[in-house]
Amino acid sequence: MSTPTLTVSPVDHDGIRAHVERALYEFLTAKAESAAAAGLPAEVVEAVRAFLFAGGKRIRPLFCVLGWYAGGGDGLPPAVVRVAAAVELFHAAVLIHDDIIDDSDTRRDQPTVHRAVADRARSARGAGADRFGAHAGILIGDFGLVWSQELLHTAGLSAAQSAAATPVLDAMRTEVSYGQYLDLLTTGRPTRDLERALEIIRYKTAAYTVHRPLQLGAALAGADAEVQRALADYGRPLGEAFQLQDDLLGVFGDPARTGKSVVSDLRDGKHTALLALALRHATARQRAHLDQLVGNPGLDERGAAVCREILDATARPEVERMIAERWQQVRAVLATAPLPPAAVSGLRGAAEAVIARTA
C-alpha cells in the first residue's frame, strides 16, 4: 500500500519544515531503539539528535522541497520529505566536522559536539578529554554522513528518481568538501584576493545551500533542462548572498541571535570577501592594524572592535552592495522563470528570508 501524499503549499515554509522535522525525529528515534536493542552506546544517537534539534533554519531541506514544486511535483510525497531530511542530516554532519576543524566552542548558543563530549569525559579522562572529544566528534559526524545516506536509500524513490538524484548528490557532496578544503588552505592567511574568497563561497556554501538542494528536488519531480537552468540562475546568486550575509553576521551580528561568536572569524583569520575587500581598500595604517590583529589567536573583544571599525569603513558597504546586486538577479530570474506560480511565490519568500536574516 502506498504512503499518502502530504498536503502543504510551497509558500507554507513552516509546514514544510515541520514535515522534515518529523521525518528526522522518527528516523533518529528508530536509530536509538535499534542501538539500545543491540547494547550500543546511546550517546551517539543522542549527540546527533541534540545537535539537530538545538536549532537550525532547515534552509537546505526547504529548498529541496521547493525544487520539487518548481519541477512540477504534485503534493508532497513522504519520499521527497525523507530526501530533504537526508540533506539536513548531511548538513549536520558537515557542521560537526567543521566545528572540529575550526576548533569552535559553540554553535547555536550551545557547546559544539566535540566540546560537549570532552566536557562529559573530563572527570574520567582529565588532560586527554579534549583529544577524546575531537576524535569522538569526528566519528559522530561520520554517523551523520552514514545515516544521511541511509535516509536516502530507504526513502522509497523510484528507479528513475534515484538515477536522477544520484549525480546531484554526488556533485553536492564533492563541492562542499572542496569548499571546506579551500577554506582550510586560506584560513589564517587572508589576502586581497577577492576571487579566491568568492570561489570558497561558491563551493562551500552557494551550491550546497541553495542550488544543489533545488536541483535535487527538481530532479525528483522529473524537471526538464529549462527548469533546471532557471533554478541554477536563481540558486547561485542567492547562495552567494547567503554567505556574504553570513560573513557580515560573523563580524557585526548579535551573538544572542546568531548563537555564534563575533570574534572567532577574525581570530581564525577566515579569508572572506569582507576581509579581502578591506585589505584592498585599507590605508597603510589600517592594513597594519588588520595584519596585526586578524588571525591572532589572542584576539580579544577590544581588538575585534578595532577590526570592525576598519571593516565598516573599508568593506562593509561594498559587501552590502554585492548582496543587493545578487538579490536583484534573483528577482529578475523569478520574473521570467518557467515555473508554477505557487513555486515562484515560495521561492521568492525563501529568498527574502535569506536576504533579510539577522541570524
Image: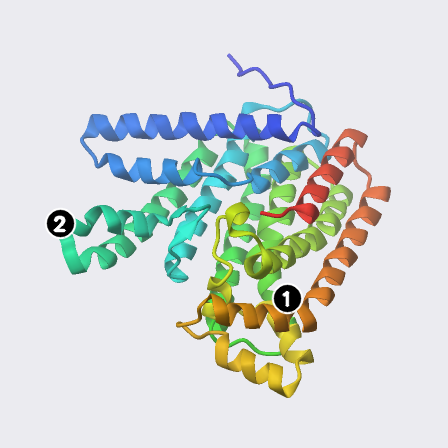
Rendering colour mode: rainbow
Looking at the image, the residue that sits furthest to the front is 302
Reply above or below: 257 against 315.
above
Quick one: 224 or 92, which is closer to the camera?
92
Name the residue tied to disc 2: 124
Label 1 sits on residue: 198
Residue 317 in the figure: left or right of residue 48 = right
Can you give x and y, in whole percent of width and height, for residue 347 in the image? 72, 38
Report the residue at 72% width, 34% height from top.
Answer: 346
Location of residue 337 in the rendering, given as x and y in whole percent from the top left corner: 82, 42
Q: Is label 2 or label 1 in front?
A: 2
Residue type at mark 2 is: Ala
Identify which residue, 197 or 231, lies in the foreground. Answer: 197
Residue 280 circle label: none
Residue 151 in the image, given as x and y percentages of width and height: 44, 34
Q: The disc labelled 1 sits on which kind of residue?
A: Leu
